[in-house]
Image (cartoon, rainbow, N blue to C red):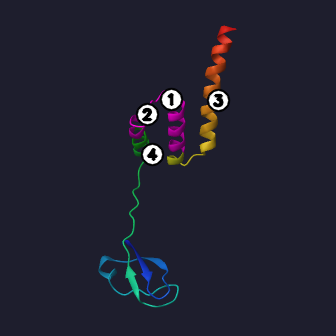
Amino acid sequence: MPLYEYRCGACRKRFVKLLSVAQRDDPQTCPFCGHNETKRLVSRVARLRTEDQILDDLADTLEFSGDPDDPATMRRFMREMSAAMDEDPHEMEAMFEEELAGESTGGEEESA
């Protein structure tokens, strides 16, 4: 059974009900004020994606977002990736900074 979203005409609050398709157009009682002056709303649909689909979408955006060798482009990509994967963006930023610092000190150590 799908979830339907309604708005009460009396108190103007929104609420959600789990109803059959046959019941969706019946007047629904507002759980906040008890009136049945409700209107069914068009709700947004959530699209569930797997981790692989999220990474594929991010890879597609990287192709069109600029030079992948540019640190600013990579930093922006890393922020987007950490947000999409529900990870701490500061942790990803710190890893990125460590990598950049390692490249700059790595060259100095080799020449010393």
The kind of residue tagged 3 is Glu
Residue at the far right in the pictured view: 112
Give yes or no for contact between labels 2 and 1 (Cβ–Cβ under 8 Å).
yes
Which is nearer the N-term, disc 3 or disc 2?
2
For the N terminus, the image quarter is: bottom left
Q: Which residue is under mark 2? A: 66
Element type at marker 4? helix
Give yes or no for contact between labels 3 and 4 (Cβ–Cβ under 8 Å).
no
Element type at marker 3? helix
Frontmost residue, 57 versus 23: 57
| Quadrant hosting residue 38 | bottom left
Which is nearer the N-term, disc 3 or disc 4?
4
The CA distance from mark 3 to mark 1 is 16 Å
- Mark 3 vs mark 2: give the one in front: 2
Q: Which residue is under mark 1? A: 70
Q: Is residue 36 above or below residue 14?
A: below
Which mark, by number, is residue 98?
Answer: 3
The kind of residue tagged 1 is Asp
Which is nearer the N-term, disc 3 or disc 1?
1
- Mark 2 vs mark 4: give the one in front: 2
Residue at image position (40%, 43%) is 57
Q: Position of residue 66 (x, y in %)?
A: 43, 33
The CA distance from mark 3 to mark 2 is 23 Å
Element type at marker 1? loop
The kind of residue tagged 2 is Gly
Q: Position of residue 72 (x, y in %)?
A: 53, 34
The CA distance from mark 2 to mark 1 is 8 Å
Q: Which residue is under mark 4? A: 51
Give yes or no for contact between labels 4 and 1 (Cβ–Cβ under 8 Å).
no
- Mark 4 vs mark 1: give the one in front: 1
